[in-house]
Image (cartoon, rainbow, N blue to C red):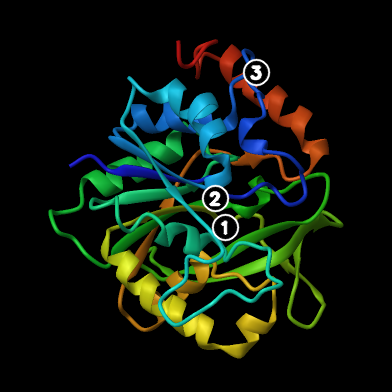
Amino acid sequence: MKPTLFLLAAGMGSRYGGLKQLDGLGPNGETIMDYSIYDAIKAGFGKLVFVIRKDFEEEFKEKIISKYEGHIPCEMVFQSLDALPEGFTCPADRTKPWGTNHAVLMGAGVINEPFAVINCDDFYGSDSYQVMGKFLSELPEGAKNTYAMVGFRVGNTLSESGTVSRGLCTANEKNQLTSVVERTKIQRMDGEVKFLDENEAWVATPDTTPASMNFWGFTPDYFEYSQEFFKTFLSDPKNMENLKSEFFIPLMVDKLINDGTATVEILDTTSKWFGVTYPEDRQGVVDKIKALVDAGEYPEKLFE
């Protein structure tokens, strides 16, 4: 069975402003998402599912889905603040979405096969889709609790324009994830990669530390775990009082590996990640994409 690619497209990009998913960065106005989908089709993915905001549906269909139809089947699901389990209501003043794992939950009704999750505004590179596509397509029928994550070297994922948020990872001798901790402020300082820890201190970490760039591989059992754990998350008064609290994928994964429910293999990749975290990053991304096109990695026009 061909795996599905699940694209998280509900965010507006808090720092960058506007719908960065739609920003044309390639030589013919291609978006980062166009390259992701091109790479995924080449790597053997058989279906696309997009999670978006409902009020963006028409524009999304017209500008985005129309491009890929005929190349690969596409579906849309919607993330909203009030999509909560029975018995929970969204605080009246909350405007921020519930986070990446809440977005993943929206796919529960339409994804019944192994699937990869990506941010649709991140450029992951063709090799990362190859390694994830191979992992998912080689899973035995009905596999459960055997997940994967593409591990990028943190030194290859930074922005020159400011701090970034990354899930920093540790692994065991089988190259399985043992912990992933979301660090919300990471940057290069004095030649070293450093993050701000819980005590507001800057801590150095090696350039080669695997970072989760939110490129995960799951099987459908992951939805059930997420539904249950989301209730636990919402039952904590702190998460309800803090209007910016988020149900991140690493939070769920960390629980599943720590209680021994699941394993997550870290898939090494030669790909370098890049993305537009800040407006100043944009030109650098345009230049990097042009270099890949010039080198023959991508055609001039992706979806004719």
Instruction: Give whichever of 171, 211 is nearer the camera.
Output: 211
**Image coordinates for residue 297, horizontal then vertical, percent:** 50, 19
- Which label's residue is closer to the chain start, 2 or 3? 2
Q: Residue at x 63, y 18 (%)?
A: 29
Residue 192 in view: no
**Image coordinates for residue 97, horizontal then vertical, percent:** 61, 62
Q: Are marks 1 and 2 in contact (CB under 8 Å)?
A: yes
**Image coordinates for residue 103, horizontal then vertical, percent:** 48, 58
Residue at numbered disc 1: 211
**Image coordinates for residue 57, horizontal then vertical, percent:** 51, 39
Local SS, label 1: strand
Instruction: Give whichever of 278, 103 is nearer the camera.
Output: 103
Q: Residue at x 41, y 57 (%)?
A: 106
- Which label's residue is closer to the chain start, 1 or 2? 2
Residue at numbered disc 2: 152
Query: Dot 1, how many residues are within 10 Å of its Cα: few (below 14), some (14-19), or many (20+)?
Result: many
- Which label's residue is closer to the chain start, 3 or 1? 1
Numbered label attached to residue 290: 3
As drawn, 58 above or below 224 = above
Which amino acid type corresponds to the residue marked 3 in the rendered image? Answer: Lys
Q: Is residue 9 left or right of residue 112?
A: right
Instruction: Give whichever of 183, 66 is nearer the camera.
Output: 66
